[in-house]
Image: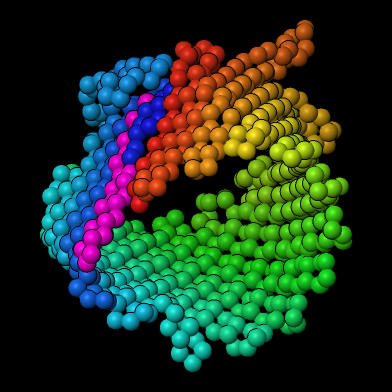
Amino acid sequence: MYHGLDEIGAGTAFYLNVERGLVWSLWQGDANGLYRRPTGSQGELKTSGDLKASIGRKFHQNLDLEAVFQGDFYQFERFEGPSPLFPTTTPPPGLWKMPGQPLSSAYPLQRIERSLVGLGGTFKPDTLLTLSSIIGQQWERREGFDDQGLSASLAAELAGFEYKGYRNNLDLYLEQEELGDRSNRELRFNYGLNKAFSQNSADRLEVYYRQKRQDYHIWGTSAIGTRMDTDQSIRNQLRYNIESNLAFFWDTQLLGSTHEDRSPTANAIREEVNTASSWTLQGQKDHTSGWGRVKIDWGVQEDATGLKRERGTSLEGGFSWFPTYHDSLAFLSAVRKRQYDTSDTANYDDRDRLRYEFDLLYGHKFSSTFRVYSHAEVTLEHLVYIFGEKSDQNHWNRIFKLKPEVSFEPYWGWHNCARFELVANSTDYDFELDPAFIKSSIYRRYTAADSLAWEITPGWALSLDYTIGLEDGGRFLWDEWIQQISEEYRTQQMRAVFIRRTPAGIHFDAGVSLYERKGWEYKIEPGIGTVKTPFMYLSRWGPLLQLTYPSVSGLSIRAVGDLSWVHEWDKNDYTIVNLDLRVTWQ
């Protein structure tokens, strides 16, 4: 269950598997509903659900026959009129009702219902091959049309078949639906091949093909449209061990797809082809390991808007070093370049992107109870548009991060961890056309978090967490290294939880959480200068609960929930309730 400011929803799911001798049954399904009414917009209600049931009997060691029922529905409604009343406290189940609102004439009701009744079977002639099939009658209702007809599917799986050192895996699926004037079809094929040529070299190949056709009724007419989707791919990886501690990998892939939408009045086609190759060298010696990779990819897409090409090249690498038992060091870096071109002379979106990435990690153990880690990241990206019509969008994006962490365990049962993070993200445009409107900006954030866990006695524990975050953002003059702050925020969050663990396996957590966020804005007042004034405030607090209850009878219950009372400037106080209840019987 979920109850928020602008939406309310609920969902449930179940799964049941029962075996009695040679007879077995499988039941599973779910149902979900969500109503949204954001301020100033129409209300939307989405409901969906599905049910699958199978009852079967084992006639032989390798043959099962079953009766199958499948049903699902989806409905989307849009409402207009006054907003429904959302109470500030959650009412008991069944008391919340949606006002009787007329359907919006701007958006018709969408409802899809499908059901299938059939017979199926699974045949395993040996331990490697599995054959399964389902045939039955299918009913489908959508967009005011009722369709029915025959549905049949066939699946074959061959796993782990070896021939002359080649290990083969095959997965084949075929489905056909004849629903009156509509015909749906899906063919899926997946083949994998592995071969170890020697202790030093091996190869893995994977081939995939999928074709799906789906007919649909065109709203408001008696015509039928057809969607055709075709996807295929080939992937291969060659591994060669140059030495015992030095390996070479060559990865290649080729992807292609075609998406076609046919109707009596139009025919839209989109074709895509993508290919990529990478060469990786990986080595290790004593306390040092490292790797380096060169990757090249290329792609093309063609549709009604023309031909689009994209090319990329990257050089990546990293190494890790453990000079002593107490120290560890790792460094990662990458240089990536991407080019995007179009064939449309009226499209000025052609651009190049150059990106640099650097990561440095260091850790030191002062003792078994005191450890320090530090992580530094730098990302630099330059975006350049080829044509002058969009050159005012050329810019540099620079991100700097520093994240130290301290872990301390002074006594048995005590654990304290402090984390800090400093982030600076600036966007600097190559051309500022209007001095009165500077697009270059900067965002900065400082976060400090501390968590304390105390095991009071065996089975009883206390967890305390506190986080504070300071943020600001505004205009940035890179050449003069000047920041003009426009907004500033402060966020605080705290959580205290008592934890109970019993020898029987019962877990019970209960506590309280608090969250507060304040915001200020900076404005320049004539004759006064910069004035800082508050413009937003949000606070929420409430209890939280988590319970896990297992039993020897196979029945287990897990409940997770929290309740928050929310106060927000310029709005009425409201309540948010989250509840997740799961019951499992094995």
Query: Is residue 250 at least partly visible in the picture?
Result: yes
Asked whether, in this view, residue 436 is left or right of residue 52, the answer is right
Seen as rendered, the residue at the extreme bottom is 164
Which of the 4 image quadrants contains residue 493?
A: top right
Q: Position of residue 541 (x, y in %)?
A: 55, 20
Inspect the magenta stretch and tell me whether residue 568 lies in it.
no
Q: Which residue is drawn at the image coordinates 29% and 38% (left, top)? A: 47
- Quadrant where the N terminus sits is top left
Asked whether, in this view, residue 306 is left or right of residue 102, the answer is right
Main SS category, magenta section: strand
Q: Which residue is drawn at the image coordinates 13% and 50% (left, top)? A: 146
Query: Is residue 386 at least partly visible in the picture?
Result: no
Q: Position of residue 201 (x, y in %)?
A: 64, 84
Q: Which residue is drawn at the image coordinates 43% and 43% (left, top)? A: 550
Which of the 4 image quadrants contains residue 412?
A: top right
Inspect the magenta stretch and tell me whether residue 22 lies in it.
yes
Asked whether, in this view, residue 149 is left or right of residue 81, the answer is left
Q: Which residue is drawn at the image coordinates 77% and 7% (left, top)? A: 527
Circle count:
0
Up/down of 326 relative to 531, above or below: below
The image's colour scheme reads rainbow
Asked whether, in this view, residue 418 is left or right of residue 203, the answer is right
- In this rendered view, identify the residue nearer to me: 572 or 393: 572
- In this rendered view, identify the residue nearer to me: 199 or 335: 199
Q: Which residues are magenta?
A: 13-38
Up/down of 115 relative to 45, above or below: below
Q: Position of residue 223 (x, y in %)?
A: 17, 53
Q: Position of residue 476 (x, y in %)?
A: 75, 32
